[in-house]
Amino acid sequence: MSDTDLEAFLRRQISATGAMPVGEFMQRCVSAYYAGRDPFGREGDFVTAPEISQMFGEMIGLWSAVVWQMLGEPSEVILAELGPGRGTLMADLLRAAGTLPGFRQAIRVHLVETSPALKARQGETLAGIDVVWHEAIDTLPAGPAIVIANEFFDALPIDQYVYRAGGWHERMVTCRDAFAFTDGPEVSDRRMAELGAPEAKLGEVFEVNPAARRLVQALAHRFETQPGVLLALDYGYDQSAVGDTLQAVRRHQPVPVLQEPGLADLTAHVDFAALVRSAGSAKASPIAGQGSFLRRLGIELRAEKLAASHPDKAEDLLAGCHRLINPGGMGTLFRVLALSSPNLPDLPGFVS
Ligand SMILES: C[S@@+](CC[C@H](N)C(=O)[O-])C[C@H]1O[C@@H](n2cnc3c(N)ncnc32)[C@H](O)[C@@H]1O
């Protein structure tokens, strides 16, 4: 569906059946947004960590190599990436994995991606590599697995609930001249407690990401019987809290979230505590800042080595590293969580 088709569809749908839950509105916008475009880079709407520096994917490659060793060096390991964008992280990861030939040979690459445009782009980036694409994690084959998700969970649709005198209401999107938020039906206190809603003041918003919760639950269930690990890196917060974090970005600038359905990147911060709760019996790492995680894996040393061997690019390489780990910037705003089979030792990059 094109962007203009989407806006017309949303208008028709809302006028036919009434206000639409925020989650459905976001799902339709995100799916239309990614379906036909490559939004990354200076010419696009936003930049992600793998597009800032090759060192990001390389560090995750080294991390995955150690995890493979912890899994007992299986002769085949599923290396799955959720929402792989341009395929840059995977390409950098595989190059770094080449330093441990046994690991590189064991890797079977699986990409979970719904956007036709980005699937094509990933195919170009990973030309010459055997890749299997999936629409969802359900079709990943059985076996030991390392699953990587960078800026994936923040693109999954969230439901919002707003606290009014007397109780919680689902937040909906209606359409008069323009799209606007409105209160939907009241939701019972019991249901809100099940969702993990904290105490709230009048007008405060609580967000739930049902798709992220289901996905983590399914992976945790898988890791009970098949050894595996999920590494999730995303913009987010460590403790469940109230707050409206739905945001839209276009050409690197914030824009009103309902203004241009399907034309702007819609995201919401990830509630990492909710992911840990959904993981049930899986072992959860502490939640780390991206900066400390990457520093523990040795990114600064790697940056210095790369800069020394490419003096013409030294400034850019060091700047890229700094941007990824900068406290107050990506180094702390991005959070990192690993979930694993219960019997695995503590994973690298985290301090217990
Ligand atoms: C913000 S981009 C992150 C890309 C990449 N991980 C990176 O760091 O550059 C989000 C990615 O998730 C994909 N995506 C969004 N919703 C998805 C879904 N429900 N299932 C699978 N992929 C999805 C998008 O097409 C895109 O590849």
Image (tube, rainbow, N blue to C red):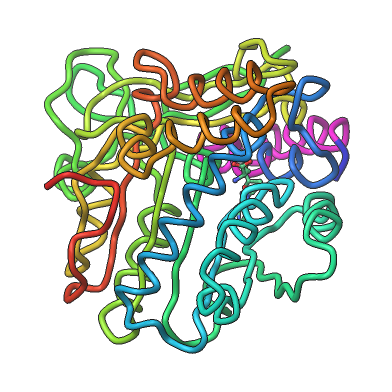
Q: Is residue 325 left or right of residue 344?
A: right
Query: Vertical placement of 81 versus 4: above or below?
Result: below
Tell me residue 93's x, y (percent): 58, 55
Quarter-of-image position of residue 53: top right
> Viewer-proximal residue, 56 or 186?
56
Q: Which residue is drawn at 52% across and 31% down?
A: 303
Q: Bounds of the magenta span?
A: 3-28
> Residue 319: where, in percent of width, then height?
57, 17
Look at 82% across and 56% down and name the residue there: 116
Picture coordinates of residue 67, whole percent (x, y): 36, 67
Residue 331: which quarter of the image? top left
| Residue 60 vertical placement versus 321 (above, below) | below
Classify residue 185 as left or right of residue 59: left
Which quadrant of the figure contains the N terminus? top right
Q: Would you place residue 37 above or below residue 66 in this image?
A: above
Total labels: the figure holds: 0
Which of 307 and 79 lies nearest the eye of the viewer? 307
In front of the other: 153 or 204:
153
Is 159 one of the magenta-colored residues? no
Q: Up-down: is 240 above or below 62?
A: above
Magenta region, main secondary structure = helix
Residue 288 lies, in percent from the top left, at 26, 37
Residue at left 57%, top 76%?
107
Query: Residue 10 magenta-drawn?
Result: yes
What residue is at 44 percent from the left and 23 percent from the top? 330
Q: Which of 216 and 67 is in front in this view?
A: 67
Q: Quadrant of residue 240?
A: top left
206 horizontally vs 153: left or right:
left
